[in-house]
Image (cartoon, rainbow, N blue to C red):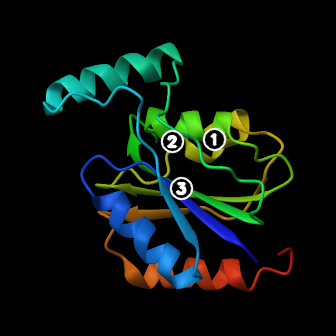
Amino acid sequence: MKTLVVYFSRTGETRAAAEYIAARLNADAFELKRAEPYPADYRAVVNCAMAEIRGGALPELAALPDTSAYDLVLAGSPTWCGTFAPPAAAFIAGASLEGKRVGIFCTSGGSGLANMPRDAAKLAPGAAYTAPLALRNGADTAAMDAWTDALSNDPKK
């Protein structure tokens, strides 16, 4: 099973989780970047992200990974306003995920997945979603181990 881990990370928490998951699955990893980076100031990032989320705007990405060679695509994001950070949403909406196994994971300070499973299904309705993973502060290696083990043992692979 060839796996790709795609993620957006602002503070490094989601990056650390994505790198751990990629290493566990011997997967390729791809970090999403906005074509125009978010401002450095935290309050400015929040204002920008809130405007994108409320307006349903998906930012232009610097690049999209080619998912054609992968059986399983894992998409990671911090939980922002109860959903994906806009760059992660832009990836899910813009990537070729039709008929692929897709797993979503998030890092958060406590809000968990919130609306992410519902929103992912709207962004890429043709994907076959696996059970999602919510990580509190991205450091739960036991949860990541259990999730990656379940993905590896899924009979649908």
Give how far apart the Cα atoms at labels 2 and 3 are.
Answer: 8 Å
Q: Given the image, on which type of amino acid does mark 2 rest? A: Ala
Answer with mark 2 or mark 3, whichever residue precedes in sequence: 3
Q: Which residue lies at the image location 77% right of the left edge and 61% below the top edge?
A: 69
Name the residue at the left extreme.
Answer: 41
10 Å neighbourhood of mark 3: few (<14), some, or many (≥20)? many
Q: Given the image, on which type of amino acid does mark 3 rest? A: Val
Q: Position of residue 155 (x, y in %)?
A: 85, 81
**Badge 3 element:** strand
From this view, report whether residue 124 is shown above or below residue 20. above
Answer with mark 1 or mark 3, whichever residue precedes in sequence: 3
Q: Are marks 2 and 1 in contact (CB under 8 Å)?
A: yes
Determine which residue is flagged by label 3: 6
Q: Which residue lies at the image location 58% right of the left edge and 81% below the top edge?
A: 25
From this view, report whether residue 72 is shown above or below residue 21. above
Which image quarter: residue 19?
bottom left
Q: Quadrant of the N terminus?
A: bottom right
Q: Which residue lies at the image location 79% right of the left edge and 49% below the top edge?
A: 127
Q: Which residue lies at the image location 58% right of the left edge and 74% below the top edge?
A: 27
Q: Position of residue 30 (x, y in %)?
A: 50, 57
From this view, report whether residue 112 is shown above or below residue 10. below
Determine which residue is flagged by label 1: 92
Determine which residue is flagged by label 2: 88
Instruction: Give the camera-side residue of 17 and 70.
Output: 70
